[in-house]
Structures are given as C-alpha cells and as structure tokens.
Image: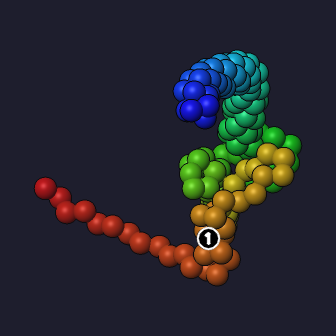
C-alpha cells in the first residue's frame, strides 16, 4: 500500500517537472534564436554596406577600363595612327588597318591588319580572345566578298 500511495504523487511531480522543463528549454531556445536573429540582421547591415562599397569600386574600375579602351588611340603608348584604328569593342577592342591612311593618300600600296585588345593593369585575355589570337597567329584568316543580287 505504501508504494501505491507514493506512485501518484511521484508521477504528478514528474509530469510537472517535464512540463516546467519543456517551457524552460523552449524559452531558452527562443532567447537564443532572437539573439542570433539580431546578430544576423546586424551582419546583413554591415555586410550590405561592404558589398555596396565593393560594387561601387568594381563599377568604377570597369568604367575606367571602358574609358581607357576608347581613349587608347590617343594615348602615348599607342604605336599606330589613330585614324587607322577601328573600335569594335567585342570580342576584341580594335582592328587596326596599319598604313590605311597612307594608302588613301597614295603614299603606300599595302597595309598590315592588327587585332588589338586593350587591358588596364594586369588584365588577361578572355578565353575567346585567346582563341582569336591563336587563329590570327596560325594565319587562320580569310577574305570573302559577298555579292547581293539587285532587286
């Protein structure tokens, strides 16, 4: 009889203990989640500012590169007559018809054609530009004339 008298109060105490423990742990988890959410929001703000700064700097760098590409024929290091250079922008920046101005003025009878890409700083050729460069170096170039029918 003594054992059965203790069973119900112990069972009630265990249930109350589990319920109280559940609410305590749930409260702790909620507090931790709130703290981490606040940390995440703070990080988003800080990282967002850094990302924006980085984006602006990259944009400036890209813009400076585009300006340098356009201005290359009038820069001191440009070894060709600027009038002979034709900007195409993609996949290379220039096709230079070296000597074309002299041919037009009847001073020469031949030209040399140069494909040029302008890089700012330590820029490297893209994969497509490397393939074009190889094609030129391997003399994989040709001339075609397309005659369209009169209508």
Quadrant in which residue 43 is drawn: top right
Residue drawn at the location 59% of the way across and 23% of the way down = 9
Is any atom of residue 2 visible in this view?
Answer: yes
Which secondary structure lies at badge 1?
helix
The answer to whether residue 142 is left or right of residue 104 is left
Q: Which x, y percent locates residue 44?
A: 69, 23
Q: Nearer the viewer, residue 64 or 42?
A: 42
Q: Which x, y percent locates residue 119?
A: 76, 50
The answer to whether residue 18 is left or right of residue 123 is left
Is any atom of residue 53 visible in this view?
Answer: no
Q: Which x, y percent locates residue 103?
A: 62, 59
Quarter holding the N terminus is top right
Which residue carries the number 1 mark?
Answer: 131
Q: Nearer the viewer, residue 92 or 28?
A: 28
Quadrant in which residue 28 is drawn: top right
Residue drawn at the location 75% of the way across and 57% of the way down = 124
Q: Nearer the viewer, residue 12 or 2?
A: 2
- Packing grade of label 1 (10 A; few <14, some 14-19, many >=20) is few
Residue drawn at the location 71% of the way across and 59% of the way down = 125
């Amino acid at each position: 009889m003594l054992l059965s008298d203790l069973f119900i109060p112990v069972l009630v105490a265990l249930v109350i203990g589990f319920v109280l423990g559940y609410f305590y742990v749930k409260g702790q988890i909620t507090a931790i989640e709130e703290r981490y959410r606040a940390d995440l929001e703070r990080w988003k703000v800080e990282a967002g500012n850094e990302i924006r700064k980085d984006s602006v700097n990259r944009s400036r760098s890209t813009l400076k590169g585009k300006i340098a590409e356009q201005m290359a024929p009038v820069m001191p290091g440009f070894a060709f007559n600027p009038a002979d250079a034709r900007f195409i922008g993609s996949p290379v920046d220039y096709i230079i018809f070296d000597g074309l101005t002299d041919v037009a003025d009847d001073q020469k009878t031949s030209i040399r054609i140069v494909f040029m890409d302008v890089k700012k700083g330590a820029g490297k050729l893209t994969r497509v530009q490397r393939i074009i460069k190889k094609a030129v170096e391997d003399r994989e170039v040709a001339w075609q004339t397309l005659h369209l029918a009169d209508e």
